[in-house]
Image (tube, grey):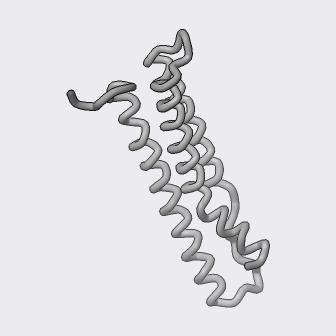
């Protein structure tokens, strides 16, 4: 795999990569809060930190979605142009999926108790 191909693949998956980092950090933050709760932290502050983390991740995905990428060179053949068009469309679908997944991931933090079982 060439260096350019690897870069194109990473850019195509950038939304999902940001989502996976968001997922790990969000639940890592909640786990740290529930196990080693720093003195002075409240559930309200945990939720605010989760919302800030989500806002930063959403902004990162939106910036990466606007970044000009996955273009075709002017002399590219038809098969290469079709491949790049498919990759661009797949990348946009993955970006939309990542945005929905980030919003879905933050809901339990906002609606459920921070620590302990969800239903008693």
Q: Quadrant of the C terminus?
A: top left
Asked whether, in this view, residue 101 is left or right of residue 57, the answer is left
Asked whether, in this view, residue 67 is left or right of residue 52, the answer is right
**Residue 58: x %, y % from top left:** 55, 42
Q: In the rendered image of this protein, does residue 58 appear above or below residue 51? A: below
- Residue at 59% x, 62% y: name it: 13
**Residue 94: x %, y % from top left:** 50, 61
Asked whether, in this view, residue 98 is left or right of residue 17, the answer is left
**Residue 112: x %, y % from top left:** 32, 29
Looking at this view, name the residue that lies furthest to the left.
Answer: 120
- Residue at 43% x, 49% y: name it: 100
- Residue at 65% x, 68% y: name it: 9
Does the rendering let one see residue 54? no
Q: In the rendered image of this protein, does residue 59 appear above or below residue 39? A: below
- Residue at 33% x, 25% y: name it: 113
Q: Quadrant of the N terminus?
A: bottom right
Does the rendering let one see residue 65? yes
Q: Which is more toward the observer, 62 or 109?
A: 109
Looking at this view, name the residue that lies furthest to the top.
Answer: 40
**Residue 51: x %, y % from top left:** 50, 30
Q: Which is more toward the observer, 86 or 54?
A: 54
Asked whether, in this view, residue 19 is left or right of residue 4, the answer is left
Q: In the rendered image of this protein, does residue 45 appear above or below residue 26? A: above
């Amino acid at each position: 795999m060439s260096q350019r191909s690897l870069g194109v693949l990473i850019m195509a998956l950038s939304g999902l990569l940001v989502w996976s980092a968001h997922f790990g950090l969000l639940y890592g933050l909640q786990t740290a809060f529930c196990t080693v709760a720093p003195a002075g932290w409240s559930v309200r502050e945990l939720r605010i930190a989760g919302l800030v983390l989500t806002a930063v991740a959403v902004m990162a995905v939106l910036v990466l979605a606007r970044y000009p990428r996955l273009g075709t060179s002017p002399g590219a053949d038809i098969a290469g142009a079709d491949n790049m068009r498919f990759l661009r469309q797949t990348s946009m679908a993955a970006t939309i999926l990542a945005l929905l997944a980030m919003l879905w991931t933050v809901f339990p933090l906002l609606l459920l108790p921070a620590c302990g079982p969800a239903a008693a």
